C-alpha cells in the first residue's frame, strides 16, 4: 500500500466501491473549502483568482494524458464529452459495444435519430470486452469511428487501446471513455483521438469534475456542434456577433464551469501526479489479487478476467446459490461496501485500501456457509 498516499484520505477500510464513486481526498476537500470561503468574501480580485483553478486543472489533466493544455478541455462529467464527440460526427457508422455502460449508448441513439452518425452495436463475449478481432470483423468502408471504454464497468476488462488503434487504421477516430481507468491504470492514451473522463471515481475529485483530451485529427474531423460562448475566439468581446469556434480543444466549452469544483479537480490530479499512476495501479493490483483469492477460496465464481494484463481494479463475482442482495448483507455486516447488481457483486479497491479488507470479505463470505 502507498502509505503516504493513504494518509490523504479518510475513507473507511472496508470501502470497495471506487468503480461507482471515489471518496475525495483531504486535499480535494480542503481546496473546495478554501474556494468557497474565498467566494464568500468576494472583492474586486476574487472571481479572477478563483478562475485560475481551471487552468491549473487543465494543465494537470493534460500532463497525465500525455498531451498539452491546447488539446485539453475541462468538462462537468464524462457524458458531456461523449455527447460532444457523438454529435460532432456528421455521418458514417460508429462501432460501439452493446454491453457498455448506458452513458456510452445514448449519444449514439441521439445521433441516429438526428440523421448523423449511425451506431453499429458490437457484442463482446461475457468474459471479455471489445477486442481487435471483434472490431476487425465489424469494419466496413463506412465506419468512421470506434467508441470504447478503456475499462469495462462490469468486469474490469482492460481494452488494448494500441491494438484497437491499429485495428481501425488511420483516418478513423478512436473515442475512449476512460472513467473506469484514468488515474488508476496506465494506458497509451496517445492512441486515442478522444479521451473523456469524469473525476468522481478513480480520480477521487468529487462530482462535477472531468475533462476531454482531443487529438489533431479529432479537432479537424469533429464538428463543434455544442460550442458555447466560452468556446469561441474573442471570448471576452461582447459585440453581438457570432464568433468562430476556438481552434483548440476549448471549442468544447459551453460555459464557465464552477471554479470551486475546478480547484478540487486540480488538487485531486496533483495528488495522482505526485504518487504516480504506476504506483497507484500496482497497489490496486495487489488488493485485487488478494480479494480474488478470498472469493475463490469461499466458493465464489469470478466474472472478471483472470489475466492480470487484461484486468483493472474491478473484481466481479457471484456466490452460487446465494442472491447478491443476501451476499451484500453479509458484506455490510463486516462493514464492507461493494457494488450490488441484480446478478452479481463488484469489489473495487483503491491504492488507499488496507490489506485487512481481505479478512473482512473472507469473514462475510464464509458466514454464508452457515
Image (spheres, rainbow, N blue to C red):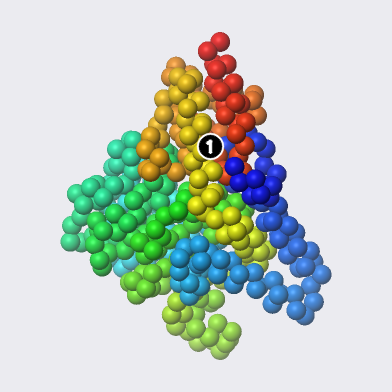
Identify whether 43 is placed above or below 90: below
Question: Could you tell me residue 265's position as x and y percent?
Answer: 61, 60
Q: Extreme top residue here? A: 370
Which residue is tagged 1? 287
Q: Is residue 326 left or right of residue 310?
A: right
Question: Could you tell me residue 279's position as x and y percent?
Answer: 53, 50
Q: Quadrant of residue 334?
A: top right
Question: Could you tell me residue 162's position as x and y percent?
Answer: 32, 56
Residue at the image position 65 percent from the left and 29 percent from the top: 335
Residue at the image position 60 percent from the left and 31 percent from the top: 357
Residue at the image position 44 percent from the left and 50 percent from the top: 103
Q: Secondary structure at mark 1?
A: helix
Q: Extreme right residue here? A: 41
Identify whether 175 is placed above or below 250: above
For the image, the number of numbered tags is: 1
Q: Is residue 219 left or right of residue 24?
A: left
Residue sitting nearer the eye, 139 or 369: 369
Question: Could you tell me residue 19's position as x and y percent?
Answer: 52, 43
Residue at the image position 59 percent from the left and 72 percent from the top: 55
Q: Quadrant of residue 199?
A: bottom right
Of the 4 image quadrants, the one containing the N terminus is: top right
Residue 124 visible in the picture: yes
Identify whether 169 is placed above or below 370: below
Residue 15 visible in the picture: no
Of the 4 image quadrants, the one containing the C terminus is: top right
Identify whether 319 is placed above or below 276: above
Q: Extreme bottom residue here? A: 239
Amino acid at each position: 500500500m502507498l502509505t503516504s498516499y493513504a494518509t490523504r484520505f479518510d475513507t473507511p477500510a472496508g470501502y470497495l466501491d471506487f468503480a461507482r464513486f471515489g471518496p475525495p481526498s483531504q486535499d480535494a476537500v480542503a481546496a473546495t473549502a478554501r474556494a468557497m470561503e474565498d467566494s464568500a468574501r468576494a472583492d474586486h480580485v476574487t472571481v479572477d483568482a478563483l478562475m485560475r483553478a481551471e487552468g491549473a486543472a487543465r494543465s494537470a489533466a493534460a500532463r497525465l494524458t500525455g498531451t498539452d493544455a491546447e488539446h485539453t478541455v475541462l468538462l462537468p462529467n464524462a457524458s458531456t464529452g461523449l455527447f460532444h464527440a457523438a454529435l460532432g460526427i456528421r455521418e458514417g457508422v460508429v462501432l460501439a459495444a452493446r454491453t457498455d455502460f448506458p452513458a456510452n449508448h445514448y449519444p449514439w441513439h441521439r445521433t441516429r435519430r438526428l440523421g448523423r452518425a449511425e451506431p453499429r452495436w458490437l457484442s463482446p463475449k461475457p468474459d471479455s470486452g471489445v477486442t481487435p478481432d471483434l472490431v476487425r470483423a465489424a469494419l466496413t468502408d463506412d465506419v468512421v469511428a470506434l467508441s470504447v471504454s478503456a475499462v469495462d464497468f462490469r468486469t474490469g476488462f482492460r481494452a488494448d487501446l494500441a491494438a484497437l488503434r491499429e485495428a481501425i487504421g488511420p483516418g478513423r477516430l478512436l473515442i475512449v471513455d476512460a472513467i473506469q481507468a484514468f488515474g488508476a491504470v496506465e494506458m497509451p492514451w496517445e492512441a486515442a483521438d478522444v479521451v473523456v473522463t469524469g473525476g468522481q471515481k478513480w480520480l477521487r475529485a468529487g462530482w462535477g469534475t472531468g475533462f476531454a483530451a482531443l487529438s489533431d485529427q479529432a479537432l479537424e474531423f469533429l464538428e463543434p456542434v455544442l460550442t458555447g460562448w466560452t468556446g469561441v475566439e474573442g471570448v471576452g468581446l461582447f459585440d453581438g456577433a457570432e464568433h468562430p469556434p476556438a481552434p483548440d480543444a476549448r471549442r468544447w466549452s459551453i460555459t464557465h464551469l464552477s471554479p470551486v469544483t475546478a480547484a478540487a479537480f486540480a488538487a485531486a490530479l496533483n495528488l495522482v501526479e505526485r504518487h504516480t499512476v504506476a504506483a497507484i495501479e500496482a497497489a490496486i493490483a495487489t488488493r485485487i489479487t488478494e480479494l480474488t483469492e478470498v472469493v475463490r477460496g469461499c466458493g465464489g465464481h469470478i466474472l472478471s478476467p483472470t489475466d492480470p494484463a487484461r484486468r483493472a481494479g474491478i473484481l466481479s463475482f457471484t456466490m452460487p446459490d446465494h442472491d447478491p442482495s443476501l451476499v451484500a448483507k453479509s458484506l455490510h455486516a463486516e462493514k464492507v461496501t461493494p457494488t450490488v447488481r441484480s446478478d452479481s457483486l463488484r469489489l473495487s479497491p483503491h491504492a488507499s485500501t488496507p490489506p485487512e479488507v481481505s479478512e473482512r470479505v473472507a469473514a462475510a463470505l464464509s458466514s454464508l456457509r452457515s
